[in-house]
Image (cartoon, helix red, strand yellow):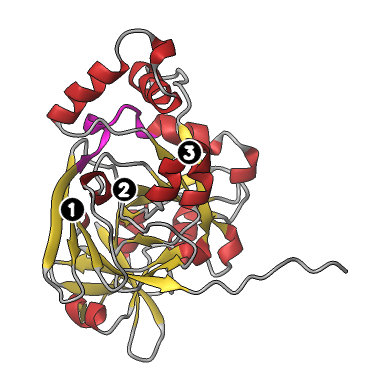
Amino acid sequence: MLIVQFTNPAGTRLVGALEQDQIRVIDGYASTYILAQTAIRSGTGLEKLATAALGSTVYQYEDIANEGRLLPPLDHRDHAHCYVTGTGLTHLGSADARDAMHKKIGGDVESLSDSMKMFRLGVEGGKPAEGETGVQPEWFYKGDGSVVRASGQSLDMPDFALDGGEEPEIAGLYVIGDDGLPYRIGFSIGNEFSDHVTERQNYLYLAHSKLRACGLGPALLVGDLPQHVAGTSRIYDVDGKPRWEKSFVSGEQNMSHTIANLEYHHFKYSLFNRPGDVHIHFFGTATLSFADGVSVKAGETFEIEAPAFGPALRNRLSVRKTEFTKVKAL
């Protein structure tokens, strides 16, 4: 099942199930968050609960998208109660990329860069046996719920940024139950969006490069993530003409870590188990236009598409003027 959050022409929030080119409203729920909390508290599977509440009201998906009425597939009414985080160095890439990477990480570990050491750790210990704990991945914080953009909204790059480039990824979407346990409600396609020029200056600048907006959606995939996910990442110029395109793969078949291992090393911190909170956690990628020497310009559009997740995620790059001057002492 694919679930979409949107607003009707009057601005009322709705949740619906995507049925080809239509969205059928799930009656009685104003948000995915409320639907998820109801499922957690009742001990009912999310898909079962949503299916039972499907109503007769139907909207055309393209109408909603064209009118800018899509919302992220999961959010929290208080941005401060939504964590946006991620993990890197988790994907193996294409067969050629895998072969090249294995050659890079072979031999004497002390001769490797810190990033390659981290990648090697994942290859060797990121997929532990059932009941065992695997190696922890690289981890980063992107922001709170205020950084999340729905399909059709702009990805705003601060004017001090050196780059704004896409990262086509899958994100896990979670709600923390009243019992303090994390519940995965599903997965979504996303554009994790980073400043790769800043990051490349020094890997210790990773934290700075990740404090950016991100795209998410438009749909939430309920249930398990396919072992193999194939998609395409594209950039269109300001005139809407294709400028760059490349396929990408994800899913555990193409990763050096299991989803369970990445989840464990995120939610093992009690800070991330506060009842009622929402978590959006990006799982990483091996494909980005920056690696092909592409610098995306304001006004150009990112498109990330994977058939398993329904319609494509589209966001235009914009530049946001920063107003900060200096801290005032009291």
Tell me what residue is drawn at x 28 percent, y 42 percent. 224
Q: What's the mark number on residue 168?
A: none
On residue 202, the disc is: 3
Q: Position of residue 39 (x, y in %)?
A: 44, 56
Residue 41 image position (x, y, % from top left): 52, 54
Residue 270 versus residue 95: which sits nearer the camera?
95
Query: Disc count in the image?
Result: 3
x, y percent for residue 76: 52, 65
Q: Which mark is residue 306?
A: 1
Nearer to us of marks 1 and 3 is 3
Dividing the picture into quadrants, the one containing residue 200 is: top left
Find the distance from the CA under tag 1 to the CA under tag 3.
32 Å
Q: CA distance from mark 3 to mark 2?
A: 26 Å
Residue 257 in magenta stretch:
yes
Task: State the separation of the CA atoms marked 1 and 2.
Answer: 10 Å
Q: Secondary structure at mark 1?
A: loop
Question: Is 179 inside the magenta-drawn segment?
Answer: no
Q: Residue at x 25, y 59 (%)?
A: 2
- Pick out the residue farthest to the top: 108
Q: Secondary structure at mark 3?
A: loop
Mark 3 near mark 2, Cβ–Cβ under 8 Å? no
Residue occupying image coordinates x 49% and y 32%:
264
- The image shows residue 155, relative to residue 195, as above or below, that is below
The residue to which callout 2 is attached is: 170
Label 2 residue SS: strand
Q: Which residues are magenta?
A: 249-259
